[in-house]
Amino acid sequence: MSSRDEAAALGLSDILQAAMADRAEPFEPIALAGGGQAIDRGPGLIELVPDRPRPGAAASVLSAGIHGNETAPLELLLGLADALDARRLQVGAPTLLIIGHPAAIVAGTRYIDTNLNRLFTHEPAASGLPGQEYARAEALMATVDAFWGQHGTPASAADQAATPLHLDLHTAIRASRYPRFAVEPFADLATPQPVWRAIVGAGLQAVLSQHAPSPTFSHYSRAQHGVVAFTLELGRVAAFGDNDLAALRPMADWLAARVEGRPAHEADPNGLAFFRVASELRRVSDDFELGFAEDVANFTPFAVGTVIARDGEAGETVVAEAPVYVVFPNARVERGARAALLARPVAAPALTSA
């Protein structure tokens, strides 16, 4: 097969698989079987451009693999690529697909040197430092800056398909009392009511709202570009092929709707459980331990008076005032890093249109 024939035979699935194997190579724009083009924006960065944009449809950033051992989101993006290659989907809205950390994906680890999802900031302390995670964060921020600079219009309050979205797809280290939940970054931007209905339609069960800015990828889009963005936790970390993709079928349908620029399935949001972070637990010293078992599930409640953690420098952290629900506990983080979020239930926002 000639090089021209090879280029003609290249599909979106091939491009994503090469990125996940950390062997992405530059490619010329390719025509997708179902319409639209795939444009190279850098290693693991592919923009889908519609031939005929659906009227009123808003752009999306769909990112996965920011942590290399979280494979279910990568399988969801591969499913999208397969559907586009097979003409089961047609690109109807600008979409940026991101394979976040190819080196960590190949290694099958959360990260190589440091947590990539704590580096999405232009603060001098976290910019321009040596190490592949710092360089990758800079590349990802530059790419979404350019994408949202072209496609980031204000969110619509009436139509979720007309609301630009960044969905950063993850899976959690541990089990959860709500296996599929959304983390809403802190920003001066309300989530439009129809997006809550789409979240429920996509199979999400709970929402955790952040109480302060944090240098995560979804926070970057929300705070820097005024784009509705979420970190979506889609079950538990598993190896490729061991994920329960049947449970993620509603999520796959939402991603497909975003690519096609059409409204996604909506469901009654009143069953969503809403929480808000009350505080962060940080590891200060090497002498640090959590006050509960390693395998405790996310959203496990702890009563007032419970010792949540012990630190050689910071001392004991004790639950005060009201019970807390522990989310993302991890005693093995780096010194100075977040070891858990401590949350409390809150009332749901207004979930019906006026």
Image (cartoon, grey):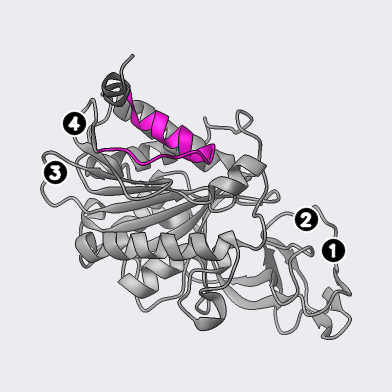
Pointers 1 and 4 in contact (C-beta within 8 Å): no
Mark-to-mark CA distance, 1 and 4: 53 Å
Residue at image location 25% in from the left, 58% down from the top: 163
In the rendered image, which residue does mark 2 sit on?
Answer: 296
| Highlighted range, magenta | 10-28
Identify the mark nearer the N-term, 4 or 2. Answer: 4
Amino acid type of the residue tagged 1 in the rendering = Phe
Amino acid type of the residue tagged 4 in the rendering = Gly
Q: Secondary structure at mark 2?
A: loop
Q: Which image quadrant is residue 313 in? A: bottom right
Which numbered mark, 3 or 1, is in the foreground of this view? 3
Please rate how many residues cluster around mark 2, counting C-alpha atoms within 10 Å: few if below 14, some from 14 to 19, many from 20: some
Identify the mark nearer the N-term, 1 or 4. Answer: 4
The image quadrant where one finds the C terminus is bottom left
Amino acid type of the residue tagged 3 in the rendering = Arg
Please rate how many residues cluster around mark 1, counting C-alpha atoms within 10 Å: few if below 14, some from 14 to 19, many from 20: few
In the rendered image, which residue does mark 4 sit on?
Answer: 35
